[in-house]
Amino acid sequence: MISRLSTDLHEDIGKILIDEATLAARISELGAQISADYSGKDLMLVGILKGCTLFLADLVRAITVPLSFDFVAVSSYGADTKSSGVVRILKDLDESVESKHVLVVEDIVDTGLTLRLSYLLENLRSRRAASVKVCTLLDKPSRRRVDVTVDYRGFQVEDQFVVGYGLDYQGRYRSLPYVGVLKPEVYGGG
């Protein structure tokens, strides 16, 4: 339960973890690396909604090779601040991935459960994708509960509750232009 909601989202941030300029520079580097790795290949980005949207939009603009993209919607948090491990598939792909090189784009990989389930990585492989790899803005390996290979990583972060730049808490904070640590008193943590 939220113990305090401020009218200014910035007031709820304990500290800025990754500022706008650092985000932009790293995403530019990721775009260059992905462009080099997928040169001459049929690349399809699969964004995991909703958290990936800002990252995916900037990443697509940083990639210089032809690509397409589509979305899936998966939920494992509900109203909590930690992944429950119970995954619900809310939206499947509209496009076929057959013979395409698929790059799954996620906002954060922590437990790994949302990426490990058959509806995502294993299911994409079963749909005869040419390859399936993972790109995440944030990687939180200290929370990993299953083995997930992250092929492209923006930043590795500690086990803190982060919001902003697409990441949310109960639907709020996605619009912040940076990644920040949410104050524990906002979400009842301590």
Image: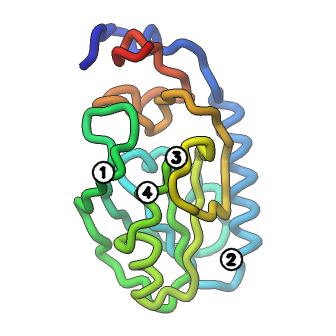
Q: Which quadrant is home to the C terminus?
A: top left
Q: Which residue is mark 3?
A: 110
Q: Viewer-nearest of labels 1 and 4?
A: 4
Q: Viewer-nearest of labels 1 and 2?
A: 1
SS of the residue at dot 1?
Answer: strand
Quarter of the rendering containing residue 61: bottom right
Tell me the crowding category of disc 1: few under 14, some 14 to 19, or many 20 or more residues within 10 angstroms, Cα based.
Answer: some
Instruction: Count all numbered tags in the image, as a single digit.
Output: 4
Please name the residue shown 44% across and 77% down the image.
122
SS of the residue at dot 3?
Answer: loop
Compared with 76, 118 (above or below) is: below
Three-letter amino acid code of the residue under disc 2: Tyr
171 and 75: which is toward the camera = 75
Quarter of the rendering containing residue 24: top right
Compared with 14, 118 (above or below) is: below
Q: Which residue is mark 2?
A: 38
| Separation of marks 1 and 2 at Cα, in angstroms | 29 Å
Three-letter amino acid code of the residue under disc 1: Ser
Q: Viewer-nearest of labels 2 and 3?
A: 3
Please name the residue shown 67% across and 42% down the image.
156
SS of the residue at dot 2?
Answer: loop
Point out residue 144 in the picture as x, y percentages from the top left corner.
Answer: 55, 50
| Separation of marks 1 and 3 at Cα, in angstroms | 13 Å
Point out residue 88 in the picture as x, y percentages from the top left corner.
Answer: 25, 57
Left or right: residue 32 compared with residue 166: right
Three-letter amino acid code of the residue under disc 4: Leu
| Separation of marks 3 and 4 at Cα, in angstroms | 8 Å
User: In the image, which disc is placed on residue 75?
Assistant: 1
Compared with 42, 7 (above or below) is: above
User: In the image, which disc is placed on residue 113?
Assistant: 4
Three-letter amino acid code of the residue under disc 3: Asp
